[in-house]
Amino acid sequence: MSVDSSSAITTKDQILVIDDDHDLTMLLESLLQKVGYRTVTAETGHDGLRLFYNQRPNLVILDIRLPGMDGWKVCERIRELSDVPIMLLTAQAEANDRIRGFGLGADDYVAKPFELRELLARIRALLRRSNHQSLEGKRFAVFDNGELHVNFDSHDVLVRGQPVHLTRREFLVLSYLIENQGRVLTPQQLLRQVWGPEFTDEVGYVKLYIRYLRIKIEETPSSPRIILTQRGVGYRFARAEDQQYSSPRGVSSEQNI
């Protein structure tokens, strides 16, 4: 792994690295500092949480297989307190681990061994999106269609009058869909807007988050009336008139894009 120090940036962002591989932790700390980030490191879950509470980093790079408290539990504890971006960095690359990680609120998943330049690009994308959570072109502060109520300022979401918790990433996906109500958005458009241009090949991310949103806001997730799939193209947030009828021809809840 190598990095071009000429691309160093000026930033106040601090990154917490939690990994029990001492050599890797020290390498990441050195390289991240070389390109301008402040870093703190821990080699156990408990130490990582302690540093998180004390330092309040801007991003967490978290290994899953940790001694004692594993990365799943650390991720869950962090999410109880904060929407800080979490990148899972692990040798475990199975699909079920990705699904579990995203379900706990992780923002990205990078498998070991990794290419450092890609890792840095993903870090920058996560921090950029975190530091600019307000989506471009937002035209209103509250959306309410009688079934779904979304406050874009407070991030409060009500579904049929009941509060629903969305992770930061889920909220951003939903916000962008609402901003483009009635318009079909491709997975690449959603990835570019919500994750960043470095993520446009990660179509699986979009599928997972659409699934999570449907589970949380649709009355019948398997037959959605709010977030629709346009077969072979992408997804769209239904207009009010669309929700009064069953899914139109060509629109499906389960078809792959």
Image: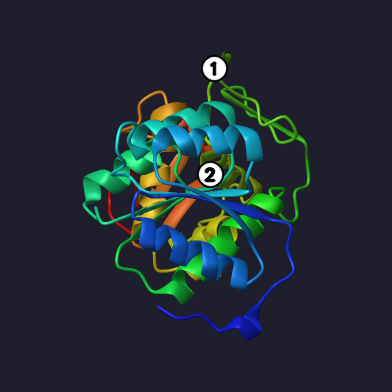
- State the image coordinates of residue 187 (x, y, percent, origin top left): 44, 60
Residue in the image at 30% along x and 63% along y:
112
- The answer to whether marks 2 and 1 mark residues whose Cβ atoms lie closer than 8 Å is no
The residue where tag 2 is placed is 169
Foreground: 183 or 78? 78
- State the image coordinates of residue 217 (x, y, percent, origin top left): 47, 28
The amino acid sitting under disc 2 is Arg
Q: Quadrant of residue 168?
A: top right
Residue in the image at 72% along x and 29% along y:
154
- State the image coordinates of residue 209 (x, y, percent, origin top left): 42, 44
The residue where tag 1 is placed is 160
Is residue 210 something that shows in the picture?
yes
Q: How far apart are marks 2 and 1 (CA)?
A: 22 Å
Q: Quadrant of the N terminus?
A: bottom left
| Direction top: furthest residue | 161
Residue in the image at 45% along x and 81% along y:
2
- Determine the secondary structure under disc 1: loop
Mark 1 surroundings within 10 Å by alpha-carbon count, few (fewer than 14), some (14 through 19), many (20 or more):
some
Q: Does residue 39 sit above or below 47 in this rendering?
A: below
Q: Does residue 178 sit above or below 128 in this rendering?
A: above
Q: In the image, is 160 to the left or to the right of 256?
A: right
Ranked by sequence position, the earlier of labels 2 and 1 is 1
- Determine the secondary structure under disc 2: helix
- State the image coordinates of residue 5 (x, y, percent, origin top left): 60, 82
The amino acid sitting under disc 1 is Arg
Is residue 233 something that shows in the picture?
no
Foreground: 68 or 253? 68
Q: In the image, is 241 to the left or to the right of 47?
A: right
Question: What is the number of callouts on the image?
Answer: 2
